[in-house]
Each structure stands twice: as structure tokens, then as C-alpha cells.
Amino acid sequence: MKKRNNWNLIVGYVLTGFIILLMLIDVFCAPYNPDKMNVAERFQAPNIRHLLGTDNFGRDIFSRIISGIKTTFFVAISTVAFGTFFGVIFGGIAGYIGGWIDEIIMRVNDAILAFPGIILALVIVTVLGQGKYQIVLALGIIFVPSFSRITRSEFLQLKDQEFVKSAKVFGANPLRIMFVHILPNTYPALLSAITIGFSNAVLSESSLSFLGFGVKPPEPSLGRMLSEAQGYLFNAPWYAITTGIVIVITVLGFNFISEGIRKVYER
Amino acid sequence: MKYVVRKIITLIITLVFVSGLTFFAFNVVPGDPALVMLGTNASPQKLENLREELGLNQSLVKRYISWSGNFVKGDMGKSIRFSQPVKNLIVSRIPVTFSLALMSLLLIVAISIPLGVYSAKKEGTFIDVIISTTSQISRSIPSFFMGIILILIFGIILQFFSPGKYVDYNQDIVEFFLYLICPSLAIAIPNIATLVKFLRAGVLSEMSKDYVRTAYSKGNKENSVLYNHILKNAIITIITLMGMIISEILAGSLIIEQLFGLPGIGSLLIMSVSTRDFPLIQALVLYIAFIVIFINFLVDILYQIIDPRIRVR
């Protein structure tokens, strides 16, 4: 049987790989210091010396973008890790044990999900203040319900299967059953959710930063750069366009990967 | 009927929960609001008076009860920064946000239904691939970038409109709506992409069902089958997603209002968060919560009416 290429995965890997490559460039050999201002060179269009041009302070846009990718990745990975960790715990408990615990967890989940996430994030940022870690906490809390819902439905499907019953007969305690036996079987669905969560996290972080509530300056952030770029649309449109395109490529890459993963397990 | 009553009770409980949470969150924030308002040079007597006036000396629960009681009666407190009753601020900005949301909603529904159905009809063809890919890309574009792109295309290159020249609805209502087209598009496009994806999947799964085969075998033309039978089920998909869409529109309006300089509820919320104007934030969050929950509630009821199969619970 001929093996058909999984186009989604391939495109996803290419795009994401490109972004990771950019990030590595920043770690090892960034062309310019992202904060170095050189007013003599402001507003240059993309040229040989400045790959993507310069901004209003003369800072090299390319270097700023690749340094911003670092922050974006950090926030995205941490947020998804947080959300997955707590989401799996809550969803697993709700799905496996059921009863009133399930009801309570699902009600709280629904309440959080019904809300526009950005508003919740704003509230948490107001209370906790700005900064990298606060953003991760805020976004993480908002992501927990989706993960817990997926985990719960997977657990519900799996908990009546034979292998669970046999584990019970062997005397395994519920905690062990949940996390050693059932959980590994939820990995396909979880993996898809994690990759989508990634792209959502990138979108949310840049939206928050755009509004001004993201990571604190001088930490670089693609969203905040876009909000600065907005003021210079007439003079230097490349600033906004390139920054935005980088965000789009990152999100697109993860979206394609998640589609690809879904197709792999759909069979 | 019992279902409606149950839903109303859930609505009230959720509202109390959300308002309590917001109130509690803001009142455990370190820092003394009186100090913030009067500055550090104020005399202790003045601070004490202000605290008395704001009711900060009472217990948390008592304050919550009096605040929510006032809220229901229509007094939503006074904004610290604007020194106006919150209610006036909200009332003056609602029409903007409401028009924006309405326009976005209309655009979303009007464009995604034909596009989704068409894309399903031409499944597998080149056009379908184009539509799917475009919608995939649109979904990856953050709403503010979409707004910037639109400003670039329509504002700078085509010179259709100039961002920042916002026209108040009191002055010229036609210009007002014209100005809103771009912002509504910015909110609408990512949501259209999502909806087209779901609609396409929904229509495709309907098309393989038996009743469609029956219709075809009776001799109905393809289009009539699509639009008479499948569309009804597509509407169900949309209504199911309606709650999510409304949330997305509200969230989108936050960002888009900021981007296009529209004086709506969204930009008010953002301003209040940057100035840490707690009474305003509290009231706004509760207000938005109320809208979201209420609309979800309406959608649920609508769902019941449209699909009789779901009524029996």
C-alpha cells in the first residue's frame, strides 16, 4: 500500500522549524543588539545591512523580532504546560470519579469557558500586576478548562474498558489506574489539544502584549512591537508587516501540526 | 417550561458567582484605595473620611451586599478616574460597541453560510482547497494584525478611509456606520474562517445521510436539496457555536476598539485597567459577564425551539 504524505504535518514542521531556527539565531549570533538605538539609521526599509529594516529608534527589526520569539515561546510553553498539568488532573478526577465532584468541576469549567478569555486575563493582570510569570499564570488558568474538558471526555470513554476492569481486579488503587493505565491512552487527543493550545497561547500572549498588559518592557514581545509599529504605519509599514507575519507563521505552523496529528489518529 | 426555569436559576447563580469573585479579587489587592485616590500627602483625617465614604471600614461581605444591591438598582458606583457615575460612562459607550458587534455578527453570518455550503458542495476541488487554506491562514492571524492589515489596505493604499477620524453617531450616522465597516471586518474575518470550517464539516456529514439520498432519488436538484434540507441543519451548527462566536466578538471588540480608536466599552475597560480604576473595572466586568451569560441563555432557549429533538430531557 502506498504511503501518502501527511501534508499538514510536513508543512507544520517546516513552518515551526523555521521559527525555531530564527530563535536559535538569536541565541547564538544575533546580528544586532535588539535594544541598540542608532537614530542616524532610523526608518530604513529592508536592506542588506538590516534584513528587515529599522524602526523609529534605529533598532534593527530583525534582531528585535527574533528576540521577541524567545519570549513568545517561553510564555506559550509555560502556559500550555500549566494548563495541561492542571487540566489533566481536574478532568481526570471529574471523568473517573464522577458524581458531584464531576458536576462542580464541569460547572466551574463552563463558567470560565463562557467568558471571553481576554477579559479574564485582564482581571487577573489587574490583581497580580504585569510581567512574564503573571501572564503565564493568567493564561494558564484560562487554558485549564479546555484541557480538563478533553481529558474528562476521554476518561469517560475509557473507564469502562476491559483493561481498566482488569487493573481493578488486580487491586490497583484509583490513582494508579487513572494515571498509569488510562492516561497514556488519552495521549492522541491530548497531543492534538496541546498543539492547538500552543497556537492559542501565542495568539493570546501577543494580544495581551498588544494591549499593553503583557510582559514588562524591556522584555521583548512581538505583540508590543506591533502596537508600537501601529503608530508608524505611514513611515515604516515593514515594521508592522514583518512582525505580524512572524506571529502568523508561528501560529500557522502549530495549527498545521495539530491538523496533521489529528489526521494521523483519525484513521 | 421546567427547563427554562432551571436555566434561569443557573443564570442567577453564575452571575452571583462571577460578581462575588470579581469583588473579592479586587478587594484583596494590596494597597489602600483611599491612599491611591488622595495621594500620600493627604492628612490622616482626610484618609479616614474617604474610607468612611467608600465604606472600606465595613466587612467584606457587607460591602459586597451593598455594592451588588446598588448595582441591581442601577447605581454602579463612581469611576475614580473619570469622576463620573459608571452608569453614564457605560450608557454613552454602549451604542458604539453594540453597533460594532451587530455589524460583525451580520458579516459573519452572511459570509460564512454561503461560503461554508459552497465549500462543502465543491469538496475536494481546487476551489475547496483554496477556501480551506485561506480560512486556515485567517484563523492564524491575530485580530489586531488583521486590523492593521485592513488599515494598510483600505486606509493607506486604497485611501477609502482614514483611521482615527472616528465620527460620532450623534453627528453623522451614515459616516459612523461607514467607519465601522473596517473594524467589523477585522473582527469578522477570523470568525468567518472558524465558522466556515465547522459548517463545511457539518454539511459534509449531512450530505452522506440517508434523507439526502432520498431527496436526490426523488429527483430534487442539487441546489434545492442543499438549501432546503441541509441548510436547516447548518443553522443548528451555527446556533451551537453562537455562544462562542459572541464571546469571540466581545473579545475581539476589546482589541479592535483600541486599534481603531472607537470609544466603546472595550476601550473603556482597557483604560480602566491601565489606571487601576477598580470601581469601574468591577462594574464593567460584571456588566460584560451579564451580557455573555444572558446571550448564552438566549442561545440555549433558541436551540430548544429550533430543534424539537433536544426538548425532551
Image (cartoon, coloured by chain):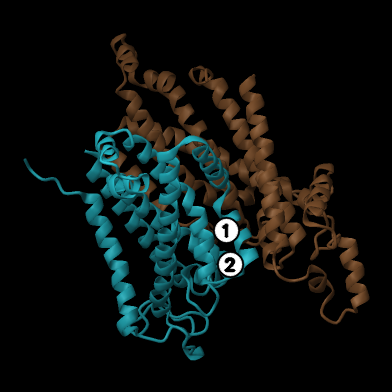
Tally the numbered discs. Answer: 2
Mark 1 burial class by Cα count in 10 Å: few <14, some 14-19, many 20+: many
Q: Would you say A206 lies left or right of B164 here?
A: left
Chain letter of the residue beneath label 2 in the structure image: A
Secondary structure found at label 1: helix
At label 2, the amino acid type is: Phe
In this view, the residue farthest toward the top is B218
Report, in whole angstroms, how far the alpha carbon at label 2 lies from the one at label 1.
9 Å
A111 up-or-down from A238: above or below: above
Secondary structure found at label 2: loop
Q: Quadrant of the N terminus of chain A?
A: top left
Q: Colour of chain A?
A: cyan
Q: Would you say B205 lies left or right of A221 here?
A: left
Residue B139 in percent (x, y) is at 42, 50
Choose top left, top right, bottom left or bottom right for residue A79: bottom left
A27 up-or-down from B189: above or below: below
At label 1, the amino acid type is: Ala
Q: Quadrant of the C terminus of chain A?
A: top left
Q: Are marks 2 and 1 in contact (CB under 8 Å)?
A: yes
Residue B18 in percent (x, y) is at 66, 47
Residue located beneath label 2 in the image:
A213
Instruction: Identify the disc placed on residue A175.
Output: none
Q: Nearer the viewer, residue B182 or A127?
A: A127
Query: Which chain can be seen in brown?
Result: B
Residue located beneath label 1 in the image:
A121
Residue plotted at (40% across, 71% down): A69
A260 up-or-down from A204: above or below: above
Q: Can residue B301 be seen from the camera position used here?
A: yes
